[in-house]
Amino acid sequence: MKSILYAAVAAGTLVAATPVSRDVIDTSFDMDDSAACASTAVIFARGTFDSGNIGVWVGPQFKKALEEKIDSVAFQGVNEEDYPATLAEYVRENGSESCADGLAATVDAYISKCPDSKIVVLGWSQGALCAHKGLNRISASALPQVKGLVTFGDPNGLMDKLAVPSSVKFSPFCVKDTVLPDPLCSQTLSSGFQLPTSISELHDLVLEPLRTLPDFATGVEQTKAAVALVPQLAVGFVENARYFAKDLLTGKVRKWLVTPQHFVYGNNGMAEEAAEFVAGL
């Protein structure tokens, strides 16, 4: 009963956040060697199971918003070869190590080619963890050109909480709704919400609400991703059950609580707010 009520309230929140349906492209390669130098370059790490190299939930929406504010911008996602965006990377590594290496390598290579460009590091969900880790692996020669870090639904506070270099301006975006906040980045849980104590409870608390997500997706690509998400997570929970048990013993179960609120950042105005922040750097 609790999960049904949770799903219903979550659905209501998503309805309020969802604009007119539109489609998206899940790849962008503006920082490749053959591309011209831009005044601002953004490297983006997508979330778990997100497709392409910028996904469909946050990357394309932020890219569109930023291109409306800056004439010369290069936007690229961490390559799929470096970052397959699996659940295993998230729960076993507290965010993909290879993603962090790939992100740092892309920034270093771009600054070597375009030394006057401003760099902004961006990440959503597991990609936010990659952004934190990758930022701390950028070379000392390139780091002065990194002007900002932007995250959406950032679970860094549930992990080892990597510090942001003092020279980099940091703007985290999180749904902190008092009724239904995003548990991965907010300080509070919904009223009456109980943390799961078993895989079966995790299934009920996470998978049931997410079954409503296709009803509130915008466009074909988001709808396809939303439909695929529940079976992907169901398999991932089974494959990584022993890591859930470990987190249960150490009090870190909250990092497993992905909810519908975690998927609204591209549609609720926060992508546009983030673009405004980046344009002002």
Image (spheres, rainbow, N blue to C red):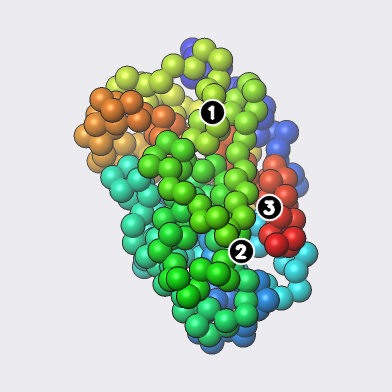
> Residue at the location (65% across, 28% down)?
177
Relative side of 85 to 211, left or right: left
Give SS at disc 2: strand
Quadrant of the drawing holding the C terminus: bottom right
Q: Identify the residue at horizontal 51%, vertical 30% (top origin).
A: 183
In front here: 43 or 141? 141
* Vertical relation: 212 (above or below) 272: above
Please rate how many residues cluster around mark 3, counting C-alpha atoms within 10 Å: few if below 14, some from 14 to 19, many from 20.
many
Depth-wise, is mark 1 or mark 2 nearer the camera? 2
* Image-based side of 267 in relation to 228, left or right: right
The image shows a total of numbered marks equal to: 3
Q: Quick check: 136 left or right of 266?
A: left
Residue 153, position as x, y percentages in the image: 54, 42
Q: Residues within 10 Å of mark 2 (few under 14, many from 20)?
A: some
Indicate the amino acid at tag 1. Answer: Gln
Question: Which mark is drawn over residue 187?
Answer: 1
Residue occupying the point 40% across, 63% down: 137
* Disc 3 from disc 1: Cα separation: 21 Å
- Camera-nearest label, 3 or 2: 2
N-terminal label among 3 and 1? 1
Residue appearing at x 46%, y 49% in the figure = 163
**Residue 147 - label:** 2
What amino acid is at disc 3? Ala
Label 3 or label 2, whichever comes before in sequence order: 2
- The type of residue carrying mark 2 is Lys
Specify whether residue 115 is in view: yes
Q: Quadrant of residue 212?
A: top right
The residue at which mark 3 appears reads as 274
In the image shown, does 2 or 42 lie closer to the viewer?
42
How far across and down, in percent of the image, does residue 83 sit? 38, 61
In the picture, the disc for residue 120 is none
